[in-house]
Amino acid sequence: MKVRDCLTSVAQGTPADRLDREVMLAHVLGKTRSWLYAYDDDLLEPVQVEGYQQLLQQRQSGQPLAYLLGYRDFWDHRFVVSPDCLIPRIETELLVERCLECLPKDQPCQILELGTGSGAIAISLALERPDCQIVATDASASALALARHNAHQLSAEQIDFRLGDWYAPVNQTSFDLIVSNPPYIRSDDPHLLRGDLPAEPSQALVAGIDGLDAYRQIIPGSLGYLSAHGSLLLEHGHDQRADLISLCQDAGFKQIEIHDDLSGVPRVVIAGRG
Ligand code: GLN
């Protein structure tokens, strides 16, 4: 079978299917997607065709592309992912962007990330701000192992990874910035049955009947760990803007801003004592 023949079968289906399939074929061949088009006359080894078809089958049975490939690109980096962690989302780059804007430019800062998963947020911040110290927690030992692996691979050595629920493993109390992309989906949300979500750890997705359980711990809890001028930055769901504002106000935050993601969806709350 030639590359072209695989690409022809790729031509069927939606554009998303096509992109996924090109990525899988390129992955099996160890080439880029543009290589597939430049060398579409090349003959594939039977083992390559077999590898491709195996991936295709797993993808069709609902396995997320990121888990099949074993990585997901986020910010400027490639993160190893597995079913032990949430797959980093492009919209979460807004959280990283806003964190970098909130951090004072001219002084080393202390950052706390809660529920680090693959480590994508903490590591992206660490690589942008090597002068900052970061503590990153997660309640899942296997997710934390993945985060440690990613930090090591990407040479982000200044992160102190700690196992435990939210603030439980944290023994330092004056962070300039606390950041989290916690679980925020309602337990009966039909989205949990679509796309990649059924394959992802529900611990990283679901937060009680109204999706706010994690915020109820993180938001009031943050006051015991934030410095006087520190900021709390949280990703939230598309319809949780008002809930997040109320929770931050109830906790005593005076300065509260909501930021939209690139699709114009309210996505990040920034709270400070004011
Ligand atoms: N943004 C993700 C989604 O809706 C959920 C991630 C999360 O709960 N933090 O698929």
Image (cartoon, grey):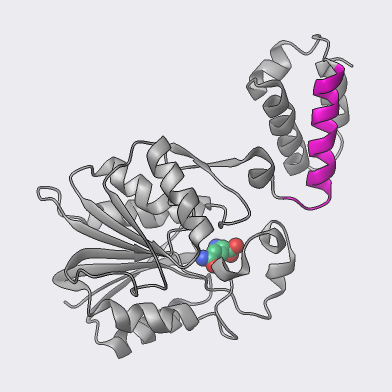
Q: In which quadrant of the rendered view does residue 17 lie?
A: top right
Residue, far bottom = 250
Residue 56 lies within the magenta run: yes
Image quarter (top left, top right, bottom left or bottom right) of the C terminus: bottom left
Picture coordinates of residue 130 (x, y %)? Answer: 23, 42
Q: In which quadrant of the rendered view does residue 32 lie?
A: top right
Picture coordinates of residue 44 (x, y %)? Answer: 82, 15
Q: Main secondary structure of the magenta part?
A: helix
- Residue 74 visible (yes or no): yes
Picture coordinates of residue 8 (x, y %)? Answer: 87, 25
Which of the pair 257/126 is nearer the observer?
A: 126
Image quarter (top left, top right, bottom left or bottom right) of the N terminus: top right
- Residue 262 visible (yes or no): no
* Image point (28%, 69%), residue name: 170
* Image point (80%, 43%), residue name: 14
Residue, far left = 106
* Image point (64%, 80%), residue name: 187
Residue 242 lies within the magenta run: no
Picture coordinates of residue 186 (x, y %)? Answer: 61, 79
Count of numbered marks:
0
Q: Is residue 249 above or below residue 23?
A: below
Q: Which residues are magenta?
A: 46-63
Q: Is residue 216 above or below residue 124?
A: below
Q: Which of the four quarters of the rendered structure image does ligand 1 lie in?
A: bottom right
